[in-house]
Image: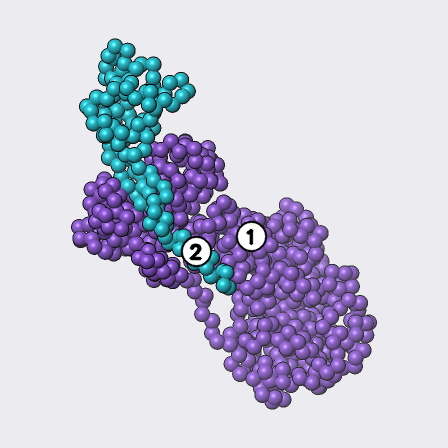
Chain colours: A cyan, B purple
């Protein structure tokens, strides 16, 4: 008994101390410029080519509004699905992922049109 | 410390979770058994006593105890339930007399066997097996003329299963002589008493068994040891002595009955004596020879009416035919009735005007017994199905005990179907519940319900566990039933702590929208067969990685559970930075706690669309009630990498799936 009770308590504590949150992340729009040799890939963002400027495409990106959330254990976040922090846009060349961006990344750059070519080497 | 306190509170809440709130809110009307008069033993009561509360092995043993399959069998044990008669005793009690069959080869004048059921809650088997055996020196013609037993001479043997006592009575010319302890030799299975080497084991018990006979009778008939109580049973067994405390039938009514059974009502008399069994056996032979789709009682009704009229007509004209060859003082008595039954030409003539159907396949006498036994329990439309199941399980040459035991097990399924309104064929149900004919009714029901559940949700035993405290009716409704009408349940705004009335109303609308979405998805699943409809095929593949029926049944079960389970409807509004409400948070919950409230974050939840509000509730319900995790969200690349097992425990898989098919 002396062993079983703490084990049971730990299990129960594990259950009740777990919290799931549901979060909503608004849509976000951004214009970007990218060399035509590269591709953009995203599963929650609609892309449209607005123009061709020299060897680049001018894209209009619209990140969908998504739902995410967090899992907390004893008050500490152990898992997160954050639509702003998550790298939702990938730059692809061939089969390789060259670079990824989150909405927060774009917000940090804070430009009307972002030249993604500048970030390919990072 | 703050968290520890919260955890302890939640533990207490978790431990106290017993679904009582649900039961109070949505009362389930239990099927009520029809009320029976006190002390009135009905056929249903007797069947419950005899076989319904026991497992297949017990029933088989019980049946075999009363029968023998060998060549020299004394008697078999087909209870003719449909010939059962209630007998009102003068002390107010009603007992039920159920005739037992006697094989043709063992049947002779003055023999009879029956079970007498009586009310006695103090024992498990409140019935008496009775066997009566007339001595050979009775002038059978005398007895047959009036069909009373006033000149009966012989012995009546009884085994009271209630207290396992055995007794014997000697009767001479209708007079009860004594309760005597017969010589030991007379209870041995030898030729002195029975012409069979393998007779009833109970009679091998000998010494000291009759000392308690007086107590037994007084217990049975509340006679408190009064010698008359012994006379009462003799009166009952020996119906010719209608001058004691036994109620008499009005002799002017001409209805025969318990005091003076006639040919016409031979099957209606509680004393199913040797003559009756002879008739029964003869009728069984006729049915088997001609493959009639009839039972002996039905054939008797046809033949008796025909022969009676023709017999009288023949007698009055003095012509040949029904009365021929039986002497000048021809009477339509039992002797001549049996004799006439053996004339195929007369039987054929009598049946020519009757609407009798003939079975396509040959049927044996035993087959007639089995089919007619089935008809005692099942309506005509199910007789073939039940017969096929029995033959499949016992084999065409299987023993009669096996077939009877199977029948009793199937009768349990009939009760089960009626009790819970399960619309499945007996074949399907028997396959699913195969071998589940065991234990008491409640345990049997539990067993079959669990088997049905596993059959329908083979991969989702967790749902059964979640439904653990619910009644079998609710569990079966979960599998086969229609979604409950919860409009009243959702008529008022929910309990929403900290909500304004407007906010609470919004939550109620979201609940109703969520219920609509669940109804929609459940309806779609009803027609799903693994390859059609295509939208489910594709969405199952997309969100759960597989579209097999097993996986679909799992998903279906989760949605059913959410839909059928009226939740606690307990919510709490929290402002940003309160609890786990962050700047983007719509709602949060403690998973799998069920009794805790769903926390809704102000203002995000109320600012979201109605679809989002409803799907958020479904998402939280899967956390709260089914224990899903947030392994990945639909828009994340990891979502596509989830394997099926993980998808089935991923909250957003369900939310995305239902939003896609039932927005």
Per the image, the residue denoted by label 1 is B433
Instruction: Give me the residue at 43% from left, 58% from top.
Output: A9
Q: Position of residue B158 (x, y in %)?
A: 68, 76
Instruction: Give me the residue at 75% from left, 78% from top.
Output: B206
From this viewpoint, is residue B144 visible?
Answer: no
Instruction: Give me the residue at 39% from left, 34% from top.
Output: B639
Nearer to us of marks 2 and 1 is 2
Judge by depth and name the residue closer to the eye, B4 or B617.
B4
Q: Is residue A74 left or right of residue B379?
A: left
Instruction: Give me the residue at 43% from left, 33% from top.
Output: B641
Q: Position of residue B151 (x, y in %)?
A: 70, 80
Q: Position of residue B457 (x, y in %)?
A: 48, 46
Can you tell which quarter of the image residue B440 is in? bottom right
Q: Are marks 2 and 1 on the same chain?
A: no
Can you tell which quarter of the image residue B651 is in? top left
Can you tell which quarter of the image residue B58 is in? bottom right
Q: For residue B413, which numbered disc appears in the image?
A: none
Q: Is residue B169 left or right of residue B423?
A: right
Judge by depth and name the residue closer to the eye, B384 or B172.
B384
Q: Is residue B170 left or right of residue B606?
A: right
Reply above or below: B273 against B403. below
Instruction: Give the secondary structure at mark 1.
Output: loop
Q: For residue A10, which numbered disc appears in the image?
A: 2
Q: Chain of mark 2?
A: A
Q: Chain of mark 1?
A: B
């Amino acid at each position: 008994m002396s062993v079983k009770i703490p084990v049971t308590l730990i299990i129960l504590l594990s259950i009740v101390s777990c919290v799931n949150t549901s979060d909503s992340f608004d849509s976000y729009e951004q214009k970007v410029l990218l060399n035509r040799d590269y591709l953009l890939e995203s599963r929650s963002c609609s892309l449209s080519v607005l123009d061709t400027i020299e060897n680049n495409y001018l894209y209009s990106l619209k990140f969908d509004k998504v739902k995410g959330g967090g899992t907390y254990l004893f008050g500490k976040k152990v898992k997160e699905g954050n639509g702003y922090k998550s790298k939702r846009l990938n730059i692809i060349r061939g089969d390789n992922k060259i670079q990824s961006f989150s909405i927060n990344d774009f917000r940090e750059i804070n430009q009307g049109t972002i030249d993604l070519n500048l970030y390919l080497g990072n | 410390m703050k968290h520890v306190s919260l955890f302890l509170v939640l533990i207490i809440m978790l431990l106290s979770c017993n679904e009582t709130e649900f039961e109070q809110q949505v009362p389930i009307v239990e099927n009520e058994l029809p009320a029976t008069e006190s002390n009135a033993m009905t056929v249903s009561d007797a069947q419950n006593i005899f076989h319904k509360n026991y497992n297949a092995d017990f029933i088989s043993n019980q049946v075999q105890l009363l029968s023998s399959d060998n060549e020299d069998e004394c008697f078999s044990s087909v209870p003719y339930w449909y010939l059962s008669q209630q007998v009102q005793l003068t002390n107010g009690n009603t007992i039920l007399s159920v005739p037992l069959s006697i094989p043709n080869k063992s049947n002779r004048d003055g023999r009879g066997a029956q079970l007498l059921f009586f009310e006695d809650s103090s024992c498990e088997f409140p019935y008496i097996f009775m066997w009566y055996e007339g001595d050979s020196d009775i002038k059978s013609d005398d007895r047959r003329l009036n069909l009373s037993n006033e000149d009966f001479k012989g012995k009546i043997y009884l085994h009271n299963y209630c207290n396992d006592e055995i007794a014997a009575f000697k009767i001479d010319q209708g007079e009860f002589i004594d309760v005597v302890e017969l010589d030991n030799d007379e209870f041995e299975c030898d030729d002195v008493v029975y012409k069979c080497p393998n007779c009833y084991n109970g009679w091998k018990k000998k010494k000291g068994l009759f000392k308690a006979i007086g107590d037994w009778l007084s217990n049975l008939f509340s006679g408190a040891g009064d010698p008359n109580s012994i006379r009462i049973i003799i009166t009952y067994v020996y119906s010719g002595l209608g001058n004691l405390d036994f109620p008499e039938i009005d002799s002017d009514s001409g209805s025969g009955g318990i005091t003076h059974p006639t040919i016409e009502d031979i099957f209606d008399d509680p004393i199913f004596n040797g003559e009756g069994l002879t008739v029964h056996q003869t009728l069984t032979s006729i049915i088997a020879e001609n493959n009639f789709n009839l039972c002996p009682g039905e054939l008797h009704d046809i033949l008796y009416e025909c022969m009676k009229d023709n017999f009288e007509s023949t007698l009055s004209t003095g012509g040949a035919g029904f009365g021929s060859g039986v002497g000048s003082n021809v009477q339509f008595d039992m002797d001549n009735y049996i004799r006439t039954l053996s004339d195929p030409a007369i039987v054929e003539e009598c049946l020519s005007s009757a609407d009798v159907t003939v079975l396509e396949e040959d049927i044996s006498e035993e087959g007639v017994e089995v089919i007619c036994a089935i008809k005692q329990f099942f309506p005509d439309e199910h007789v073939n199905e039940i017969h096929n199941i029995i033959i499949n399980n016992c084999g065409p040459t299987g023993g009669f005990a096996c077939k009877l035991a199977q029948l009793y097990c199937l009768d349990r399924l009939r009760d089960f179907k009626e009790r819970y309104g399960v619309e499945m064929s007996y074949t399907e149900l028997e396959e699913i519940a195969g071998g589940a004919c065991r234990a008491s009714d409640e345990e049997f029901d539990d067993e079959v319900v669990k088997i049905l559940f596993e059959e329908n949700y083979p991969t989702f035993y967790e749902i059964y566990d979640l439904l653990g405290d619910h009644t079998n009716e609710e569990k079966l409704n979960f599998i086969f039933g229609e979604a409950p009408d919860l409009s009243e349940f959702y008529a008022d705004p929910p309990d929403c702590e900290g909500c304004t009335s407007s906010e609470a109303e919004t939550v109620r609308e979201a609940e109703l929208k969520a219920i609509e979405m669940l109804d929609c998805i459940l309806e779609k699943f009803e027609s799903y067969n693994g390859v059609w409809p295509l939208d489910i095929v594709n969405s199952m593949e997309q969100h759960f990685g597989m579209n097999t029926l097993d996986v679909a049944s799992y998903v279906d079960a989760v949605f059913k559970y959410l839909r059928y389970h009226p939740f606690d409807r307990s919510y709490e509004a929290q402002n940003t930075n309160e609890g786990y409400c962050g700047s983007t948070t719509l709602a949060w919950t403690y998973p799998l706690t069920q009794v805790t409230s769903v926390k809704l974050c102000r203002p995000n939840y109320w600012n979201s669309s109605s679809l989002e509000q409803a799907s958020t509730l479904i998402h939280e319900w899967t956390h709260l009630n089914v224990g899903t995790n947030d392994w990945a969200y639909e828009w994340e690349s990891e979502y596509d990498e989830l394997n099926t097992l993980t998808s089935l425990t991923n909250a957003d898989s369900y939310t995305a799936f239902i939003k896609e098919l039932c927005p």
